[in-house]
Amino acid sequence: MAKKEKRSKTMKIYAFIDSQNLNLGTSKDIFHGRKLIYKGWKLDFKKFRKYLSDKFRVDKAFLCIGYIKQNEKLYKHLKSFGYELVFKPTVKDNQGKSKGNVDAELVLHAAAIQFSEYDRAVIVSGDGDFYCLYEFLEKNKKLFKIIIPNRKSESSLLKQFQDYKIFLIRDKDKVERK
């Protein structure tokens, strides 16, 4: 279980962000049958980076994102906001839509490439695919927070990590694009 702890001045906190889960988790309307149970909204990535710094004292934020050549301007903006981009090559699905699942990149960066560089990790995703990463980070006393875009799309596999979970909808006023 997580314990309340003070962050020392030298403690390094890194965030690892599943960009697709964050984007769709905030922006997509969710229905139960015909009833709207979650109204999507637009995330301001610049405000979100500031939020990570201010609320969780995140030193570095790794944004795992599918690479599409036509999005170079977007990538430049994201970098200017303070994100370190971790790209995944994309492929086209049957409808011609670009797909780039970044789960492996996020896990590799959090559990191997950056592991010795930080003291605590903030994972941004409500996806149960990261269950093994949460377990690994908790066992190694490095799991700090799990930021879940919305309660309606949270995986049931996250139940055992209650003490770490933060729902972004609670701070929507701080990170919404107006």
Image (tube, rainbow, N blue to C red):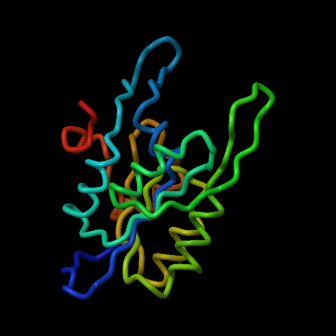
Q: Quadrant of the C terminus?
A: top left
Q: Is residue 109 left or right of residue 154?
A: right
**Above or below for 86 versus 65:** below
> Looking at the image, how many numbered discs can be counted on the residues?
0
Of 137 and 74, nearer the camera is 74
The spot of residue 28 in percent (x, y) is: 46, 28
Q: Residue at x 33, y 55 (%)?
A: 81
Q: Quadrant of the N terminus?
A: bottom left
The spot of residue 129 in percent (x, y) is: 61, 56
Of 38 and 8, nearer the camera is 8
The spot of residue 96 in percent (x, y) is: 75, 28
The spot of residue 79 in percent (x, y) is: 41, 57
Q: Residue at x 37, y 70 (%)?
A: 60
**Above or below for 92 versus 63:** above
- Say which quarter of the image contains residue 22: top left
Q: Is residue 160 left or right of residue 87?
A: left
